[in-house]
Image (cartoon, rainbow, N blue to C red):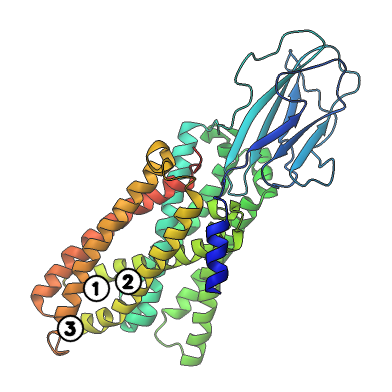
Amino acid sequence: MAAWFGVAVLTAAPASAHVELLSSNPADGARLTSAPARVSITLSENIGIQPNSIKVVDQQGTDVVSGPVFQPGEVAEEVAVALEPDLPDGSYLVEYAFVSTDSHPVRGTIAFVIGTGPLITSAGAVSASTGTDPVTDALFTTFRWGSFGGVALLGGLVFLVVCRPGGRADPAARKLITAGLWLSGVTAVAGFLLQGPYVAGRGVGAVFDGALIEATLRVAYGKLLLLRLAAIVALAVIVRRLLAGDLPDRLRSRYENLGIAAGFIVMLSFSATGHAVADKIMFLSVSADLAHFGAMAVWVGGLIQLAVLLRGRYSASEAEPALARFHPIATRSIVIMVVSGAYLGFRLVPSVEALWTSAYGIVFVLKLTGFAALLLVANLSRTAVRRGISGRGGTGVVTADLRKLRVSVGVEVLIVAVVLALAAALSSMSPAG
């Protein structure tokens, strides 16, 4: 297994992440002696048939397409539209707008001429820019940040079940889990409504456009968001039962298993719509992304719950067992995050130079810097725990150590918020850009 993994990693090419136009027929700038029967486009990945993704207009802006988008042959990456018969001489513009496997839009134009007339556009016809409305883009990234925060809050459920069973009755701890459910649900709905305008390059006023909502439902991203929303609703029912104090052990175990399944579906809906799914070694990259995201949720959710536990209203005798149980979980989570994050970085960043020459690389380095700072502060918490528990012979965490823990854990939570914001920005950017 280790040898196979090494070969797969060392011999694989980096992921392209966003779909790219490889060729077109007619080509951009082509001059034809007769009208073509269709316009075809070959892409870098198979994105399926996306309705209305190719439009052809003449010089007056009149649509000359005579049918829906289809796949003309056995090449899954090739899509086409049929044109009206016997088009007159003149210039024509092909406008394409596709949604990548990782849910990001890619738009551009191709110009060709029938006869000897001039091109509609003289230069820069082919473009891989997203053309996204800036306000829509900012909201889309903000809600994605919120969705990451919601999953992180839900990760605190692991802390309550494994590290602090008595905390199930704590109103403050329960409110954090409830906030995670609401934040995850609201951001899922917002992401679904914003996806249409985000892809179409329109403003937020188009969030309730029926045609855009229908287009979102047709692509995998829209379906996965609805699946995430269903899993969150199921998780809300499961959490209510898990946090009940009178649940028998047999039923508690069953609900814990159901909670794990629902949580997995929620995280999979993120990994299956991100950059990892566009990788040529999709199974490894999606698995690494799931591991990275899951470890983040368990660690960050535990930190937030720990901040509640250490806010000064609880005795050392209550904090000590929870700290002792959380310590190995946090350590393993950090190891998983480092290993999976290193693999994803290797796969997604196209080159070492891209770390300082591309926007994606710069934000990626900033995220790494924030994570490194997080590890330094986490080490302070780890030292305080070891001295407080091991150094005192299990009699309790001393007050001085609790003060240090409150400060260090509070700083960790603040840094986590910044790192999650950077991760949300990265998810909306192209590694190649």
Q: CA distance from mark 1 to mark 2?
A: 8 Å
Residue 55 as seen in the image, left or right of residue 103: right
Name the image quarter holding the N terminus. bottom right
Q: CA distance from mark 1 to mark 3?
A: 16 Å
Q: Residues within 10 Å of mark 1 (few under 14, many from 20)?
A: many
Residue that numbered label 1 is attached to:
309
- Dot 2 lies on which element? helix
Q: Which numbered disc, 1 or 2, marks the residue that appears first in the sequence? A: 2
| Residue 266 seen in this snapshot | no
Residue 306 as seen in the image, left or right of residue 269: left
Residue displayed at 85% across by 43% down: 73
Looking at the image, which is closer to me, 342 or 319? 342
Q: Which mark is residue 164?
A: none
Q: Amino acid at mark 2?
A: Ala
Q: Are marks 1 and 2 in contact (CB under 8 Å)?
A: yes
Q: Which numbered disc, 3 or 2, marks the residue that appears first in the sequence? A: 2
Residue that numbered label 3 is attached to:
389
Residue displayed at 85% across by 29% down: 66
Q: CA distance from mark 3 to mark 2?
A: 23 Å
Residue displayed at 79% across by 8% down: 116
- Dot 3 lies on which element? helix
Q: Position of residue 410 (x, y in %)?
A: 22, 62
Q: Position of residue 231 (x, y in %)?
A: 56, 66
Residue that numbered label 2 is attached to:
173
- Dot 1 lies on which element? helix
Q: Which numbered disc, 1 or 3, marks the residue that appears first in the sequence? A: 1
Residue 286 as seen in the image, left or right of residue 392: right
Q: Are marks 3 and 2 in contact (CB under 8 Å)?
A: no
